[in-house]
Amino acid sequence: MRVKDLELDYKVLRQDGDFHLHSLTEHGQRSPIKYLCSVKKHSDTHFYVDSYEPTSKLSVLQEQIKNKIESYEYDSEYYNPCYRQGVFEELIIHDYLRSLGFEHVNDDTYTLGDKNIYGFNTAKITLSIWSLSAFNDVYKDGKPKDNVDVVLWTGDWSFVQVSCKRNVKDIKKGIDGLLKPLLITDSVNLITKSEKLQTVGDIDILMKRITSSLDIQKKDVKTYLKEQLLEIASKL
C-alpha cells in the first residue's frame, strides 16, 4: 500500500511526517475539505492509525480509519491537528452556544435575543467566556490557561461567574448551570403574569400563533415549563 492508494479515497495532506485525511465529498464548517483523521507511516508500504497495528492492506487501514472516526466524542472536524492548542474547546463551545440561539458578538461574548411573537426582542441575555479564545493573550509557556470563566451579565457592571476546567464537558456544565435556572424561572414568571390577563379573541387562533412561534412544540406549554422547574428543584 502506498500514499497514492489513500489518495483514491481521501484528500491527503502531509505535515510533520503524518498524513491528515480529509473527505473528498464533504465540506467542513470552517474548511472546504472536512478533516477525518490522521495516519502514520511505519514503512514504505505499512501505515496505521494511532493505537492500531501497522498494516500493508488498504482494507484493514480503512477499517482503522472508520473505527477512529466513530470513537470521536464530537465531530471529526474539531480534532484537526493543524489547529493550535485550545481551538478544540473554543470551536465546540462556540458551536454549542450558536445551537442555543446565541450570537457571537466578539472574541469572548455572546448574546441571546430571541424574537417574540411580534418580531422584536423582549429581553437580551449576555454571556462571556473569559480565557476561552485561542487567539487572545491568555497563554503561558505556549499553553492556554487551565481554567475559563463563564460569566452571565446581570447589569453594566455586575455579573454572576462560574470557574470551570478547560474541557468541553466542564464548560458546558458551567453554561447550563447558569442559563437553565434563568430561562425556566423567567418563563414560569411570565406564564404566571399571563394568567392574570384576559384572553381576547379566538383562543384557537391565539394558541396557533403562540405555538408557531416556539422552537419546541408542546401541546401544554405551561405543564412543560413546570416540569422543567420541578426537575431543577429535585436536584437542589
Image (tube, rainbow, N blue to C red):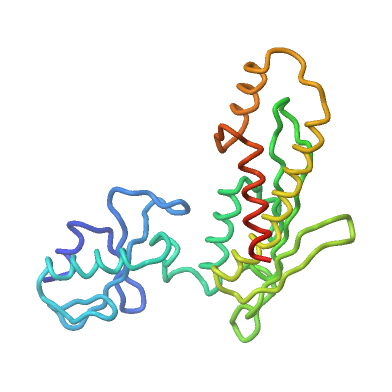
Left or right of 63? Residue 72 is right
Give percent across and percent down for residue 108. 69, 61
Point 62% across, 45% down: residue: 101
Name the image quarter holding residue 197: top right
Name the one closer to the observer, 178 or 119.
Answer: 178
Along the line of sight, the residue nearer the viewer: 7 or 217: 217
User: Which residue is at 74% across, 53% downward?
Assistant: 182
Q: Quadrant of the C terminus?
A: bottom right
Q: Residue furthest right?
A: 157
Q: Quadrant of residue 36?
A: bottom left
Point 36% across, 60% down: residue: 35
Image quadrant in which you'd find residue 67: bottom left
Task: Give whichever of 181, 163 is nearer the camera.
Answer: 181
Residue 159 position, x and y percent, is 83, 62
Locate the N terminus and report the quarter of the image it occupies. Answer: bottom left
* Number of numbered callouts drawn: 0
Q: Could you tell me residue 104's position as x and y percent?
A: 66, 51
- Of residues 50 and 118, the one nearer the viewer is 118
Residue 161 in percent (x, y) is at: 77, 67
Extreme residue toward the top, this view:
201
Determine the residue located farthest toward the bottom in the rendered image.
141
